[in-house]
Image (cartoon, rainbow, N blue to C red):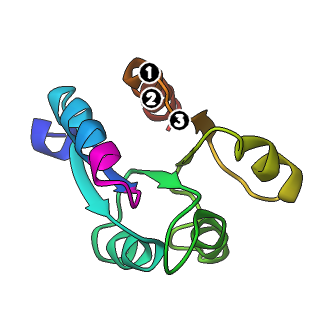
């Protein structure tokens, strides 16, 4: 496998441009390729077009929220195995955990979170995949 093939692509789906910017910078600095989408509909389109290795998904977004995006990903055999890390604003995490047990996600991070924690989660994901 060449070095180019081993570079992992991460899709960031978040409607806050500052969050997307910070995450893109941190991920790219650590050797990841990044894609971004500002809402759930655009996120699903990019998943189908680029097949990312992992998805960082905000819950509260316009057009299609993170819950709906994740459900659609998990219902589609072509995207069901993509690891999803949910990021959510303070206070929404409990709602998420109470909503559905079948909401299969790899990790939950509550904003604001240290970028090092996200990098650690991604490292764990790619070691086991």
Residue 82 lies left or right of residue 100; in this view the side is: left
Viewer-closest of 80 and 84: 84
14 part of magenta stretch = yes
Query: Which disc number belongs to residue 118?
Result: 2
Q: Position of residue 3 (x, y in %)?
A: 12, 36
Viewer-closest of 88 and 126: 88
Determine which residue is flagged by label 3: 111
Viewer-closest of 2 and 8: 8
Q: Residues within 10 Å of mark 1 (few under 14, many from 20)?
A: few
Q: Position of residue 72 (x, y in %)?
A: 61, 76
Q: Residues within 10 Å of mark 3 (few under 14, many from 20)?
A: some
Mark 3, secondary structure of its residue: loop
The residue shown at (88%, 51%) is 98
Residue 22 lies left or right of residue 94; in this view the side is: left
The residue shown at (59%, 77%) is 76
Residue 32 lies left or right of residue 3; in this view the side is: right
Disc 1 versus disc 3: distance between alpha carbons? 9 Å
Regarding residue 100, the answer to whether it shows in the image is no
Q: Residues within 10 Å of mark 2 (few under 14, many from 20)?
A: many
57 part of magenta stretch = no
The residue shown at (11%, 43%) is 4
Q: Position of residue 54 (x, y in %)?
A: 43, 49
Nearest to the eye among marks 3 and 2: give it.
3
Mark 1, secondary structure of its residue: loop
Looking at marks 3 and 2 on the same chain, the residue that comes earlier in the sequence is marked by: 3
Q: Are marks 1 and 2 in contact (CB under 8 Å)?
A: yes
Viewer-closest of 44 and 115: 115
The residue shown at (57%, 71%) is 69
Please tell me in which quadrant of the rendered image residue 103 appears: bottom right
In this picture, is 6 found above or below 103?
above
Determine which residue is flagged by label 1: 114
- Stretch of the chain drawn in magenta: 13-20
């Amino acid at each position: 496998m060449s070095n180019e093939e081993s570079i992992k692509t991460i899709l960031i789906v978040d409607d806050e441009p500052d969050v997307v910017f910070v995450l893109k910078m941190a991920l790219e600095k650590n050797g990841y390729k990044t894609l971004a989408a500002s809402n759930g509909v655009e996120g699903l389109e990019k998943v189908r077009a680029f097949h990312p290795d992992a998805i960082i998904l905000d819950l509260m977004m316009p057009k299609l929220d993170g819950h709906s995006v994740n459900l659609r990903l998990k219902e589609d055999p072509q995207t069901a195995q993509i690891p999803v890390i949910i990021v959510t604003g303070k206070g929404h995490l409990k709602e998420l955990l109470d909503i559905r047990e079948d909401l299969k996600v790899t990790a939950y991070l509550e904003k604001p979170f240290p970028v090092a924690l996200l990098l650690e989660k991604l490292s764990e994901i790619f070691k086991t995949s």
